[in-house]
Amino acid sequence: MNRDDQWAAGRVVVVTGATSGFGAAFARRLTRAGGKVIAVGRRAERLAALAMDCAPGSVLGRAVDLQDPAAPEAILQNLPEPFIAIDGLINNAGLALGLGPAQKAALPNWETMIAVNVQALVRLTHAVLPQLVDRPRADIINLASVAASYPYPGGNVYGATKAFVRQFSLGLRSDLLGTRVRVTSLEPGMCETEFSVVRFGGDQDAAAKVYAGMKPLSAEDVADALEAILRLPAHLNVNTMEIMPIQQAFGPFAVDRSGA
């Protein structure tokens, strides 16, 4: 199979959640390969640091809160000429909050996960799509999770939001038939980033226990998967890509044996 050695050269890609983890790794990978990135995140100081860490002029930071319905307009308005021809969107921003059972969950946590993982993703995709369909080649990569397919205790709304991302990606594929836009749902398993720290409200010890005794994926591992997708020939679409560390697999069915 012929892979595209110029996979990022000249491309302009919007990357959300670019201040840490997957998003920062994606931005660095794209810019090292000759692309330009519109880096989206809430923390302006981290966006500035990311720009300093990449090739001069290759990163345009947009400090916005994606929960704001006006965020897509703020991201896309008044783009300087080198960043106008957007031909890629990586919807990476997302979070999990809490790991308790649904009956004890805080409703604001559920609402925040839905707002970021679903509503913000949908709004930005809707705003960027008209540009993408006019390009000779374009990509949408949505970050879902293995939780989209495999529920686990405490995953409740987080898993549901990622199932939405997966199904939304497949729906986009159906609607975009006849265009040159590829769509992928990228679905990582256990990965050591700030994800668990956020999930446990900043509790570093609780986050560390998630990965104790095993080697999780890293942000660079997931960036490798992203690069592999984007390097594929333009006629080839990866509908979904699910990746896990070798020390993670599927559990047996849970059974309550406390009595009928």
Image (cartoon, grey):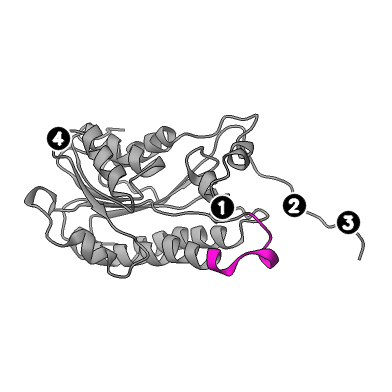
Q: Which mark lies nearer to you, 1 or 2?
A: 1
| Mark linked to residue 56 | 4
Residue type at tag 4? Pro
Horizontal side, residue 142 vs residue 52: left or right: right
Which amino acid type is shown beneath numbered disc 3?
Arg
* Coordinates of residue 220 in the picture (x, y in percent): 40, 33
Considering the numbered disc 4 on the image, is that residue within a helix, a strand or a loop?
A: loop
What element does badge 2 sit on?
loop
What number is the disc on residue 87? none
Q: Residue at x 7, y 51 (%)?
A: 81
Q: Which residue is mark 3?
A: 257
Of residue 50 and residue 118, the one placed in the foreground of this image is 50
Q: Which residue is mark 2?
A: 253
Which numbered tag is attached to residue 147?
Answer: 1
Q: Give the farthest residue toward the left.
A: 81
Describe the element under mark 1 as helix, strand or loop. helix
Nearer the camera: disc 2 or disc 3: 3
- Discs 3, 4 touching: Cβ within 8 Å: no
| Dot in front, 3 or 4 | 4
